[in-house]
Image (cartoon, rainbow, N blue to C red):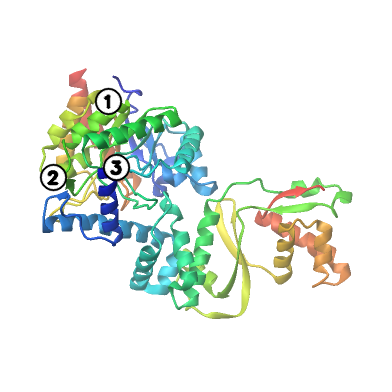
Amino acid sequence: MNALLDLQRRFQAHVLGSAPPLADAVDPPGADASTRLRIYVDAYRLRLIDVLGNDFPGLRWLAGDDGFDRLCRACIEARPSQHFNLRWYGAALADFLESGGSERPELAEMARFEWNLTLVFDARDEPIVTEADVAALAPEHWPAMQPRSHGAIRRQRCRWNTAAIRAAIDRGAAPPVAQRLDLAEERIIWRRRRDVRHRALEVDEAAALDAIGDGATFGDLCELLCGWHAQEQVALRAAALLRRWIAEQWLTALLAV
Amino acid sequence: MSRTTPSLGFGLGLRVEHYDEMLAGDPTVDWLEILSENYMVEGGKPLHYLHRLRERFPMVMHGVSLNIGSVDPLNPDYLKALKRLADSIEPAWISDHLCWTGVDGAQLHDLMPLVHTEDAIAHVVDRVRRVQDFLGRRLVLENVSSYVSYRQSEMPEWEFLGAIAERADCLLLLDVNNVYVSGRNHGFDPRVYIDGVPAGRVQQIHLAGHDDSGPVIIDTHDAPVCEAVWDLYAHAMRRLGPVSTMIERDDRIPPLGDLLIELDRARSVAAPILRAAA
């Protein structure tokens, strides 16, 4: 066991870049061993970069092919893969950029946005509230009813035109130049049927969604919306938001309290 | 010892690019092999398509992260995810690779070669038994391509593979391309390798392409099966008899029709040999 452990540790240290080739342990000997070991050294990085390239097309576009390659390699050196499934390595790149991996803030924002898209893509399936569920709700139950949002939903505050760039890439169109937005926008990323979507939230809508995340009832929403709308308008606005969220498939239950 | 499952015929590795065509048409594919890790997710498109395709095709699961040869403890999270997926799709069998993929918690995401020693056999056999106990079924282990071998090795790879299969009572996935690639890289006769594995334990065969453009052949799985590998497959068929066979393409995925033509070639290679042996 000790010999096996020693061999695997030495091999891995070489692949990760922290040890010279284990030329004394492998055949063929000499320079040819280094060349052959290089295949494993390169494969480790290329495999991770390939997966990151698939998950982060917007980041790649922003950074350029060479820049993206450099970013990925810096991330791989700083944060070796720890999860058995390659699918999760993208989290390391988003974290790496947010913790100073690049001096360009739009890159970190894009990486987080694209990682959120990936998380939503294969998040847990949950039941979807339909108009029929709403119709079945007795009027006296509306004020105390608690809408519950779908677990796959992610939110992100964007200060750059990140979403527009990624949307253009997804359409196969030429992306716009990266630009800082005059006003930061709150975006929601979710799955409708099985397709990942994203859009900007209106200010009152974002606050209302936050509130239902905290267990607010429909009555609480009406009260909250008084911050933006006249008293006589809030019930209509709350009902409109609820219909919209149902159409977008953001709600997984209407809980009768 | 006989194989646990009779041949399923001729299959393909399921790839995202072919989901819709697989569902819409009536492809001449007898079964599908899925990459287990791709479906260790909670929902969305991957599981939606997986379950729809499972309704139409027999499936087997093929993993890359079991890390059966590592000195690290077996990963309970991985094993639970593997079992959960197996309970969900009821595959005909579950395979992974005879290799190690990381140590001390790191993940190299590559199929690293094992040293062929008695110690390594004892180590792997113990782990295979524990995995089989956990899964409640025999594991199928695949030979990997390699570019270096270890001076400490005490036996050729086919003896190492066979000893593990016999002592752990597991089954084998013979990747004919990998045998060819390693044979060229290490200078052994791939026919001797195929003649050396315990025939009754070979549950499945992989056929694939590789990159033969440099001093070392690289197992890329991104090209059609080459003539030498077809010849080797015929040799394997003569020795093994009917074994579930599939084309495994992992990169530069061609249209489904191209793979179906390749799969037909596998049928046409195997058919006369199996007829003659019947």
Q: Residue furthest bottom?
A: A182
Callouts 1 and 2 close, C-beta under 8 Å: no
Q: Are marks 1 and 2 on the same chain?
A: yes
Q: Tell which circle, 2 or 3, labels the residue nearer the N-terminal end.
A: 3
Name the residue at 28% across, 62% down. Answer: A17
In the figure, B57 relative to A188: above or below? above
- Residue wearing tag 2: B186
Identity of the amino acid at label 2? His
- Residue wearing tag 3: B99
In the figure, A175 relative to B151: above or below? below
In this picture, residue B16 sits left or right of residue B122: right
Whether residue B56 is visible to the viewer of this picture, yes or no, is yes
In this picture, residue B17 sits left or right of residue A105: left
Out of B119 and A16, give the one closest to the viewer: B119
Q: Position of residue A83 (x, y in %)?
A: 43, 52
SS label for mark 1: helix
- Residue wearing tag 1: B166
Q: Are marks 2 and 3 on the same chain?
A: yes
What chain is tagged by disc 3? B
SS label for mark 2: helix
Q: Tell which circle, 1 or 3, labels the residue nearer the N-terminal end.
A: 3
Q: Position of residue A218 (x, y in %)?
A: 81, 57
